[in-house]
Image: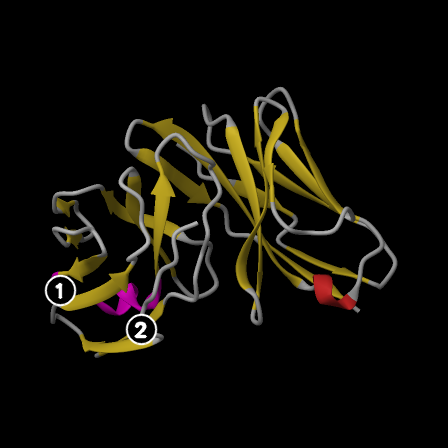
Amino acid sequence: DAKTTQPNSMESNEEEPVHLPCNHSTISGTDYIHWYRQLPSQGPEYVIHGLTSNVNNRMASLAIAEDRKSSTLILHRATLRDAAVYYCIPITQGGSEKLVFGKGTKLTVNP
Amino acid sequence: KAGVTQTPRYLIKTRGQQVTLSCSPISGHRSVSWYQQTPGQGLQFLFEYFSETQRNKGNFPGRFSGRQFSNSRSEMNVSTLELGDSALYLCASSLRSAGGRVQYFGPGTRLTVL
């Protein structure tokens, strides 16, 4: 399993953009980068995933470095509802369904 | 579509007892995974079932077991409960996609062992 490194915590103000980094220097060529988040008292929820190029969806954007050793989850305008623990998880295409969660980044959003 | 449902939501047991937790996946999903979440160890993978077969197992003792039924519903069982089994148990179902696996989690069952 590829190892990931994320900051323990980050803080943002409401309505401002947030950039959540993840280092995954041991990732293999076929691993997708998935991001999940866990709101307080809820199960984790899928946010976004990508392989090489940047990806956008209604929740967030994912910027993947050219060497694929790092990625950044971008929340364009943070809301109070975005306060959660964010996890980046490399997943091998065609491999196990198993998700290996690290400690993630706890995002605090200030009103 | 209804999400992943887990029952019961809360459970209190005493040491030595056994417990069975239930998970109903999203309609059409055939893969079900279980995770344990504790403050000390975080989220840890327990096992995964696909078409009634266990495909993968995490590093947990044999007291933890599971099964999947033909309708994809799954149960997990913990026998001879220990205090350290107190945790949030999460179930996730998935629809295999070409780009990876998106897993949809239920709200979890909070187990307290006294």
On-image quarter of the N terminus of chain B: top left
Numbered range of the magenta stretch = A76-86
Foreground residue, A57 or A30? Answer: A30
Whether residue A80 appears in magenta in the rendering, the answer is yes
Q: Chain of mark 1?
A: A
Foreground residue, B107 or A28? Answer: A28
Q: Secondary structure at mark 2?
A: loop
Residue at point 51% right, 30% down?
B31
Residue at point 35% right, 60% down?
A4
Residue A7: numbered disc: 2
Q: Amino acid at mark 2?
A: Pro
Residue at point 17% right, 47% down?
A58
Q: Secondary structure at mark 1?
A: loop
From this view, report whether residue A85 is shown above or below residue B102: below
| Left or right of A63 on screen, residue B52 | right
Residue A77: numbered disc: 1
